[in-house]
Amino acid sequence: MARIKAIPRQRTHGSYGHFLNHRQAQSHCGRFLYYDTRNSDPEIIKTTRIESLDLIDDTVRVVYDTQSRSEYGPGVGAVVCHPLRSTILFIHGLTNCDQDRPYGMTRRFGAWASFDPMKPSVQISALESRTIESEPTWGVLSGGTHAHSFSPDGRCVSFTYNDTKVPDRRTVGFALVDAWESKTSPNPEVKRVCYEDNFEGTGWSALALIPQDGIESAREECWVTNAYDAQAPLRLAMIVRLATNRTDPQWIDEIYVAEFPPEARQWPKMLQGPIESNREHNAEHWGFDVPTGIQLRRLTYSQSAAYPGVAGPRHWLQASCCGRWIYTMMKDSRGTVRVVRLGVADGQLDWISENQESITHPLAIDPQGRQLSYLVGNRLIILDLATGKQTEVQWDTQVFGQIVGAVQFLRNSQGIFWNARPNGSPWLQIWTASLQ
């Protein structure tokens, strides 16, 4: 295996957490990394700030602050960046939080802001509209969204969703946000808007799958679009947990693709008024339906494998820029977690990593779709997706402890960035390195 050197450089130093999202953490211009101030993954409920790191001079700016120190929320986190402009999107808990109504799976929304990255403090707007007082109309949700992700053209957002009526049945949804590029954030001097149980958002939102008999949940989705063809259809790949049989169900995680019809971007004009719930397949408690025309297609059939289903550490699917491939992890016949490549058209599965020990962290793909990173402990491997060549990164791991999350690629360079705690420190920091 080839080897390449990297010198880790600590970029943040504050005595608090600096938590990077697992994808889309870097600005479209490449100059800034955006993150929240958690010190570990489950701490969104008490996290108050979104910040940015200037990669040129290491300046840290507070981008958004809830101005709340409540132990019940609202909480913010998991910030992602628009691929084409200075817009960010992140999880925000409902503002009417207290001991009886703390931050939770169904009590959050996507908060977005367009702004000048050189100026601190922005005012947010809601991505999705929300109502729990009446049956929702098309484009409106009644639960909580998280794990947002922009499509490559920035015109759509995907998310994981939990509804107030069936909070334990997680699924995948999307928002069409073509119109928001003409809107700007409210004046920061204006009194903050309250985002409680009912409010109007910017995007038109819907679900891509309703869990039903035999399907428990859907999650960890990614957009599968052709970055080189603006007219390519919308597709969402997702991990779906389903039963292997009806009588004595054993649950496994398989990959599905939701294919959108050509007129999908016209849904905000076409689909109006109350949603007529699909009352078959035990879906009557949702109050939702999937827009007509979405075709759900199963991509993997791994139930007969020695170790069936998607495996390894929690991770989101990754897609190639051309839209031909999806990358995930499964266990091979020896029980080792490795990277697999799936053909979107036919589901063909290829084992593409050569690791002899199981992968321990999420995968990351570079913005050009040429390389993929994976970790075995703190041992970093860069996989060339065109040639299959694997390169081990040689670096001094004595300066930081266990890496948290994925090692991601910087835009337009040979660099990488990641989260880890400096040895001897409890605080999660941001690190970068150039690959030489």
Image: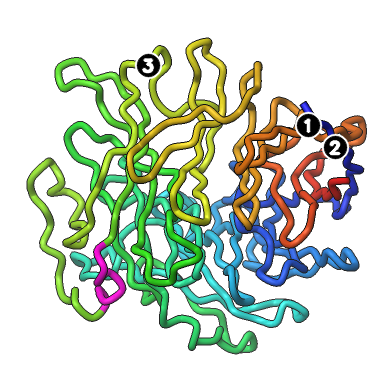
| Residue at screen point 53% across, 10% down | 334
Q: Decide if residue 177 is in sight here.
A: yes
Q: Is residue 363 magenta?
A: no
How far from the left and from the top, in percent, is residue 368? 63, 57
What residue did someone put label 2 on? Answer: 4
User: What kind of residue is marked 1?
Assistant: Glu
User: What kind of residue is marked 3?
Assistant: Ala
How far from the left and from the top, in percent, is residue 242? 28, 30
Q: What range of the chain is rendered magenta?
A: 261-268
What residue did someone put label 1 on? Answer: 392
Determine which quarter of the picture holds residue 47: bottom right
How far from the left and from the top, in percent, is residue 150? 50, 63
Of residues 204 and 196, the one nearer the viewer is: 204
Most extreme residue toward the left, as rendered? 280
What residue did someone put label 3 on? Answer: 305
Q: Could you tell me if the residues under marks 1 and 3 are in contact, i.e. CB atoms within 8 Å? A: no
| Residue at screen point 43% across, 48% down | 221
